[in-house]
Amino acid sequence: MVKAFVFGKFLPFHKGHEAMINFALTKCDFLTVLICCSDKENIPATTRQKWIEKTFETDKNLEIKIFNYLENELPNTSESSQDVSKVWSNKFKEFFPDYNLVITSEEYGNYVASFLGIEHIAFDIPKQLFPISASAVRNDIFNNWKFLPDSVKSDLAIKVVVLGTESTGKTTLTGRLAKYFNCSSAKEVGRDLIANSNSFEFEDLYLVASEHAKQIDKATLEQSPLIIIDTDIHITKSYANFIFDKTLGVESKIYNSNKADLYLYLNNDVEYVQDGTRLSENDRNLLDISHRKILKQHNIDFTEITGDWEQRFNKAVKTIKRQIEMNDKKHWA
């Protein structure tokens, strides 16, 4: 029986890693993936484990192990060095005493195999099949988003929700922002499913909540890590309270899909436009109060967006850019 292992930080797990693991599975009877996570890294090993598990959930001859280590005890480098490889090989002997194969996409794989007295099979060391590395993703996630498996994208996506009462420019701003950042967007489905804000049933809101969550999930897997979302579950819950005086209960999966990194709230300090399907202006302003109440109940902090259309757009752009920088620091600093 051929037992093999691959190892790495998988920070983040990308399609090059995925291809290497698929290759490794063809070379052995049983494969172990060892995730090496240092105490200085922000993304926990369990999250990386989830990424790989979801990608290979149908492979029964694969297991995933976690090794949490301290950087002051083990060298934290991907450099191809005999000295570094010797130190790590001593640790690998503890994990894999009876393994006979190691598979890597790095030159140091030869050193590790030599120290362990086992075989090394190299996979695409020049990175020709998948010209990507984890450091390249960390340095520029926007241009390298296409190299991430779907299992990773939901955790690294940057979700921005545009909120506000009726006739405050949510849909227009969502479109402008998506075009400016060349990113994905999730449209408001309420206007499609409920043609008139003055005439619908309470049960319709469940469909709105479900379909909107699907739109968000779909957008998360598209061409950009940034997703601009037109309204969210809190607004749907607010309509339930405001129109029907009832609480809309939804499953946790819908909340998880809606959970965002940044909430932009459009103030109702713009001209009200009645298109024949909206609430009256007075009710629109009362709905604004309802929205804010629901957001407070759910501990949602938001950035208030005021002023004319151009001022709103410019403030939104600046706020989103700042959020992108914050997300980079949160994941990779």
Image (cartoon, rainbow, N blue to C red):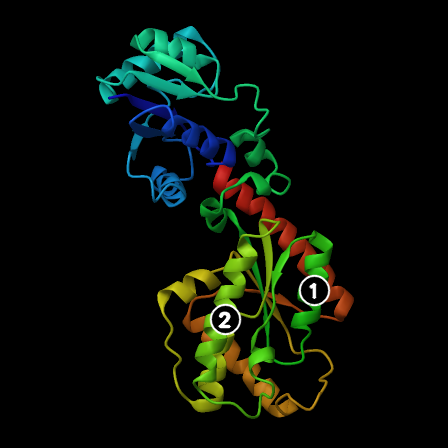
Mark 1 neighbour density, 10 Å: few (under 14) some (14–19) many (20 or more) = some
Residue for badge 2 = 211
Q: Quadrant of residue 26?
A: top left
Between 117 and 38, the one lying in front of the other is 117
For residue 259, above or below residue 236? above
* Label 1: which secondary element: helix
Mark 2 neighbour density, 10 Å: few (under 14) some (14–19) many (20 or more) = some
Q: Residue at x 42, y 89 (%)?
A: 245
* Label 2: which secondary element: helix
Q: Residue at x 31, y 11 (%)?
A: 118
Residue 79 position, x and y percent, is 48, 15
For residue 127, above or below residue 286? above
Q: Quadrant of residue 313?
A: bottom right
Mark 1: amino acid:
Gly
- Of the numbered discs 1 and 2, the one sitting upstream in the chain is 1
* Circle on res. 175: 1
Residue 233 position, x and y percent, is 48, 71
Residue 51 position, x and y percent, is 40, 42
Looking at the image, can residue 273 be seen? Answer: yes
